[in-house]
Structures are given as C-alpha cells and as structure tokens.
Image: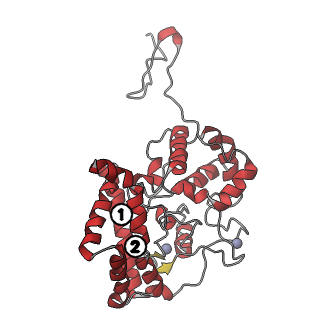
Amino acid sequence: MNIDPLTTNTLPGRKVHQHRGMIEMPPRSQLYCLAPLGMGTVEIESLTSYIQRLAWAYRVNPRVLVAEVILPHLSNTYYSDLTRLGSFSRTRSMSINGVGEVAQDWARTLEHLTMRSDLRLLTLHPWADGLPAWGLLRQKPQWCPVCYDEWREQKQPVYQPLLWAIQAVTICLQHAQPVVDLCLVCRQSQSAIASKRGLGCCTQCGVWLGGQPRSEQSREEDLIDWQKWIKEIVEELILANMMFGSLPWHLLPAGINACVEAVGGTRQLGRITHGLRNEMHLSKKMARDRTSLQAWFLQLQRNFSHVTTKQAM
Ligand SMILES: [Zn+2]
Ligand SMILES: [Zn+2]
C-alpha cells in the first residue's frame, strides 16, 4: 500500500500541493493574531489596550514591541525612536484611539502585522470621523477601579474599553462609580502605552489601580441618566457603523442649520441649551457641557463647509 505523507492526514480545507515535493503553507502573520476583547459590543477594547495585551502575550515591554515591530511599519515616522516614543506615550498616544490619520495609520499597521481586519474598530474613527475632535477623545487614560478589581478577582483579562477614552464618559454604569484618571498613590496621570507595567497597574509608580474606596458622588439620578444616554448613543453608533459602514455626518450640519434658523441664530440656540440647566436641574459641570454645544456646532459646520459649499454649487 502506497502511503503518501502529502495526501494523508490532511486537515479538511487545507490545500496541499505535491509539485516538486513542496507544501504551500498558508500565510503567517508577523504578530500573534490576538482577538480583541468586547468585539461587537459597547465594551469593545481600545487600540492602545490591545497593543499592551499583545506585548504582554510575548512577555515584552509594550514600548519595545512598539519601537521594534510597529513603528517601522507606520507611514508616519515622527516618533521613530524610543526617546521620542516615551514623550509621545506620555502626551499624545491617546490619539491612537481617536479619529484621523494617526488612529488610521496605527490600526492599518496592526491589522497588517496581525492579519486581522477588525482592529480599526478599536478606535473612534469608524463611527466618529467627521465629528469635531474638540471634546471627543480624552487626552489621558481613565479607568474604573472596581472593574479592574472585579476582572482580577474573576481571573479575566484586565483591559481598557474604548468607551473610557471618550471625554463625555465620567461614570462606570456597571458599578455607578466615577472613572478616575489619577493614581491615588503618586497622583500622576497614566501613559496610554506603558513602559513596564501590565494593564491595571500605574504606569508611573507600579501600584495596582483598583482597590480604591467607593464614591457616593456618582449616584445623582440626572448624572446617571446623562451617562446612560451617552452609552446608548455610542452603542448605536458602533452597531450602525458595523451594519452600514461610514456614517453620513456630512448631513448633520444641514439639520443643525435648520434648528439654528428655527430658533433665530446660534446664540439663541446656545441660550436655549443653557436654559436646560434650570429646567433639568443639571449640575454645573453638565451645564458647561451643554453651553459648549454652540462652539461644537460651529466646529461641525466648519468640518463640512467644503461639502455644503459643493452641494450648493
Ligand atoms: Zn466599573
Ligand atoms: Zn502611581
């Protein structure tokens, strides 16, 4: 009986070529094809969190992985060495999770290296591109200490959801706790790409970032309602993008213009939104967010002024 090792014990669907005694291997990714956490949900992981988990899967410092494997493949080279990378990690690395060219460049590069096609979803870009950058993305990471504790106790991976990178998100609804952005021990903010510590530990002094006393301040009903609304909207936008692709934000200024015309100008619209503070008994912080709408609208109009001009022609 002729037993040919190239035609027996072959997995279903696996292509085996016998030409010249060579086996055609399927392409291999340069980096481990780690699955992102929370995919398809509003708890989806952020890209900087993914990069750190990927590095620790290799047991290497995330900044070493970034410097040696990721940076050489990015289109932009302005943080091409470890020294610049250190300052970038402390200052602007949250932009990897945001909208625009930096987020796209990092997501494309990671997708190429891991041979995954879904890593762009770990940034705000797919569903928020076109919205004013102002007020959208946080400049420093924030976290819920109770989530960190819970994941560690349950031996689940500790990670940073993309939701925590959004400036408007100030509460973890799961625990009715404020998300925080300073280490309780060293009082320092965190780098989005750590140099030594695993996720959940302070990037500056190394202590565990969970274990903080619970706060009662976040239990105000109107604040919880506001945060629920934000979370629902983000969830809808993520799902809408997954189902329909790019969202038609360029149509939004026309809708806002109609509102502005109906109330008699942007200043008047600002006054109306300011008036909501008394009507809805909103806190001072929330009132500031609301009055900022006027500036936000103007920035949105500017973003799409070229589109509306073209349409008018
Ligand atoms: Zn939490
Ligand atoms: Zn610290």
Q: Which residue is mark 1?
A: 235
Residue depth check, mark 2 versus mark 1: number of the one nearer the observer: 2
Which part of the image, by quadrant, shows the N terminus?
A: top left
Checking the image for residue 294, the label placed there is: 2
Q: Residue at x 67, y 56 (%)?
A: 88
Q: Is residue 224 above or below residue 106?
A: below
Residue 157: x %, y % from top left: 54, 60
Kindly identify the amino acid type of the residue bearing the numbered disc 1: Glu
Ligand 2 visible in quadrant: bottom right
Is the CB–ligand 1 distance for label 1 below 8 Å? no
Q: Is residue 201 above or below residue 21?
A: below
- Horizontally, residue 169 falls left or right of residue 309, namely right
Q: Residue at x 69, y 42 (%)?
A: 68
Q: Residue at x 56, y 73 (%)?
A: 149
Q: Is residue 276 above or below residue 207?
A: below
Is the CB–ligand 1 distance for label 2 below 8 Å? no
Secondary element at tag 2: helix
Question: Who comes first in sequence, dot 2 or dot 1?
Answer: 1
Pick whichever, 221 or 91, lies toward us.
91
Let me know if residue 198 appears in the view: no
Residue 51: x %, y % from top left: 58, 51
Pick whichever, 6 or 38, lies toward us.
38
- Horizontally, residue 299 falls left or right of residue 90, namely left
Kindly identify the amino acid type of the residue bearing the numbered disc 2: Gln
Give the CA distance from mark 2 to mark 1: 25 Å
Residue 18: x %, y % from top left: 47, 13
